[in-house]
Amino acid sequence: MNAPLNHPLPLLDLDVLRTFTAIAETGSFTTAASAVYRTPSAVSMQIKKLEDILGRPVFSRDARSVSLTTDGEMLLGYARRLLAINREAVSKFIVPDIVGVVRLGAPDDYGERVLPHVLKRFAHSHPAIAVDVVIDQSVNLRRRMDDRALDLTLLTNSYKASAAGAEILLTEPLVWAGAKGGCAHLREPLPVSIWEEGCAWRAGALEALGREGRNYRVAYMSSHTAGQRAAIMADLAVAPLPRSFLGNDMVELGPKDGMPQIGNYSLAMAVATDASVPVKAVADHIRATFDVFKETGKF
């Protein structure tokens, strides 16, 4: 029979659990340190303190990677629940009046790449606001805004199109993307992956090819960024993509590769003129996210 404890169990520090969770999600002490606004050495000290309290290692570390131990995986579930309960409790006092449902639209490319990060962080700071998301082409999203079926939406605009009634969040170059080590750009006619009329990136890309007199054929059609990436990675075609969308397995193809420059595109945000407080909160959060991206290049 076990003897009763004569002293209370130690309390886990929520700030330390936040750091632990950040490391588990990023797989890096350095990246996590930036996310929690601490130095890498301070983060290491927090994890050492946590492991001392538990009497077990929570991470396996080597020169190249960081991974959770079995005990670390168990702790991660508890840490996320404790942090969620803390956010819920604090929000009742700090933002008790900001509740509601926000209808947010986004084109596929940013819906896939950016929104998961934005919405995850927004849910942490505003747990009482529900965000319903619609993914569609920008031309359809603008129509939904006009019909008042959306409260705010992101819109991609080609280099010639204006963002009437919308706020520009980001302007960056469109580039030709090809597979690293691929040869699709050397074929004649050039195999291109694009979508139908209405795609913000189509007009500029095809106009650039026409300006250079480059013969092309539409070899792959997909309205989804994942489909475009599949075509590129299989070396079936080249495709116009924002420069920031290129991954380590892609290369930017330019004049030295026989590919014409396309020009810039913009990402804009349209917000209902009679936006509620929850809608304004989402809009402010999106603005802040893109401000950080313009400074760091990361979402």
Image (cartoon, rainbow, N blue to C red):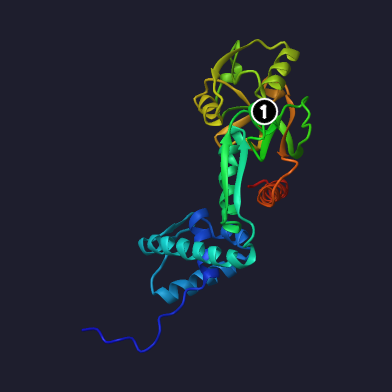
In front here: 130 or 264? 130
Judged left or right of residue 61, residue 141 is right
Q: Position of residue 18 (x, y in %)?
A: 53, 64
Front-most of 219 and 10? 10
Question: Vertical placement of 84 versus 189: above or below?
Answer: below
From the top left corner, tell me how far across and down residue 54 is, in percent.
Answer: 40, 74
Instruction: Name the residue: 42% across, 59% down.
Output: 68
Circle 1 SS class: helix
The amino acid pointed to by label 1 is: Arg
- Which residue: 43% across, 76% down? 53
Residue for point 65% across, 18% down: 197
- Location of the N terminus by quadrant is bottom left
> Is residue 262 shown to the viewer in this render?
yes
Q: Which residue is mark 1?
A: 143
Classed neighbour count for the residue bearing mark 1: other residues with Cα under 10 Å, few (<14), some (14–19), many (≥20):
few
Q: Position of residue 166 (x, y in %)?
A: 76, 36
Residue that protrudes farthest toward the left in the picture: 1
> Looking at the picture, how far across and down is residue 269, in whole percent?
71, 39
Q: Work out whether 18 lies above or below 260.
A: below
User: Which quarter of the figure has residue 56?
Assistant: bottom left
Instruction: Count the labels in the image.
Output: 1
Q: Nearer the viewer, residue 289 or 86?
A: 86
Nearer the observer, 107 or 257: 107
Residue 130 drawn above or below residue 4 = above
Q: Residue visible at 69% across and 52% down?
A: 277
Work out whether residue 259 can be spotted.
no
